[in-house]
Image (tube, rainbow, N blue to C red):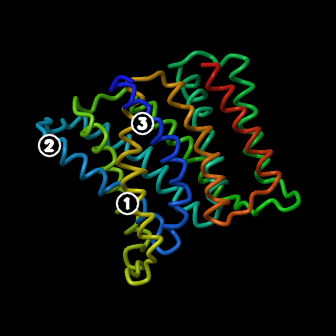
């Protein structure tokens, strides 16, 4: 296989399996680390490392316009997504969170249409969007052994999905740098700084008890920094630049499957029949929407 093909395969592996596993990692990390600090740490460290690599390898310093664009992207994709998901993970199982986040491709289609930057969704895509939202609603259906789903946390997670979709569209149009490391790291670094400020406003810095941080939580945080932020977002931007967006969006119906399996296997999360039905309907909708494009 050519080297380019190997890089593409590795990048898909990162966003399929790596991102799919981060939902459980977030849930473990917030067990003894405040949620906004989890988001701030993973993005600050990974973003700073990527920016440092870019500057050390000769990348130009970003312009003021690039910094403003990067801050907007970082706010949408890291503050309003990573921060929100970390907070919601203190209340909801990781598999449920992943299923709600799986609606991102549906929101991308809706936002492109509403903004006038994309075509009106086809009938197939509209069916997909409808099924995706029906599946999300079914997660709240109190049948049998269905796990409790916190309404507020779920609403916050749905908002996080919309924000990631908006950030993806903004990142697709922006040109932050000719350096992939700089273009990847700058939004992450600025988003991490904003999350650190948010953690301060929420009193998380004062509430943090370093001695009480468990080894699994610390290990999960390190995993989030390396796999979730550094490698994950780098792979995501690489694929957006080299592959059709509809093919990249397939991660959205692989991640929940990985998250549900790992949540049940390693996280002890209940896997109810209604959850599986909702997952099947939601992911079928995502598939229809993505394949229609």
x and y percent of residue 45 in the render?
29, 57
Label 3 residue SS? helix
- Residue marked by disc 1: 40
In the rendered view, does 49 fall on the left or right side of 74?
Answer: left
- Residue at 14% of width from left, 43% of height from top? 55
130 or 279: nearer the viewer: 279
- Residue at 56% of width from left, 41% of height from top? 162
x and y percent of residue 202 in the render?
44, 69
Place residue 177 in its image quadrant: top left
- Residue marked by disc 3: 11
Q: Is residue 234 above or below residue 129?
A: below
Q: Residues within 10 Å of mark 1 (few under 14, many from 20)?
A: many
Q: Is residue 171 above or below residue 216?
A: above
Label 2 residue SS? helix
Q: Residues within 10 Å of mark 2 (few under 14, many from 20)?
A: some
In the rendered view, does 218 fall on the left or right side of 3?
Answer: right
Place residue 186 in its image quadrant: top left
Q: Quadrant of the C terminus?
A: top right
Tag 2 and tag 3, C-beta contact below 8 Å: no
Which label's residue is closer to the chain start, 1 or 3?
3
Which label's residue is closer to the chain start, 1 or 2?
1
- Residue marked by disc 2: 55
In the rendered view, does 139 fall on the left or right side of 239?
Answer: right
150 or 203: nearer the viewer: 150
């Amino acid at each position: 296989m050519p080297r380019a093909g190997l890089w593409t395969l590795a990048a898909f592996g990162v966003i399929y399996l790596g991102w799919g596993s981060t939902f459980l990692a977030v849930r473990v990390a917030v067990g003894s680390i405040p949620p906004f600090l989890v988001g701030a740490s993973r993005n600050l460290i990974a973003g700073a490392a990527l920016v440092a690599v870019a500057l050390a390898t000769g990348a130009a310093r970003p312009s003021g316009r690039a910094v403003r664009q990067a801050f907007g992207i970082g706010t949408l994709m890291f503050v309003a997504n990573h921060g929100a998901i970390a907070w919601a993970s203190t209340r909801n199982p990781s598999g449920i969170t992943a299923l709600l986040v799986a609606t991102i491709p549906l929101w991308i289609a809706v936002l492109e249409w509403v903004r006038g930057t994309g075509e009106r969704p086809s009938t197939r895509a509209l069916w997909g969007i409808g099924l995706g939202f029906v599946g999300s609603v079914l997660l709240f259906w109190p049948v049998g052994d269905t796990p409790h789903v916190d309404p507020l946390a779920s609403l916050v997670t749905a908002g996080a999905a919309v924000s990631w979709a908006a950030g993806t569209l903004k990142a697709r149009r922006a040109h932050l740098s000719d350096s992939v490391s700089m273009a990847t790291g700058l939004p992450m670094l600025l988003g991490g700084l904003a999350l650190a400020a948010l953690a301060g406003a929420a009193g998380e810095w004062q509430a943090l008890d370093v001695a009480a941080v468990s080894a699994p939580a610390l290990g999960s945080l390190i995993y989030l920094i390396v796999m979730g932020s550094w490698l994950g977002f780098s792979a995501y931007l690489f694929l957006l630049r080299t592959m059709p967006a509809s093919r990249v969006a397939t991660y959205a119906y692989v991640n929940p499957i990985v998250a549900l399996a790992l949540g049940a296997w390693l996280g002890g999360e209940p896997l109810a029949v209604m959850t599986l039905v909702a997952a099947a309907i939601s992911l079928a909708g995502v598939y229809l929407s993505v394949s229609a494009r």
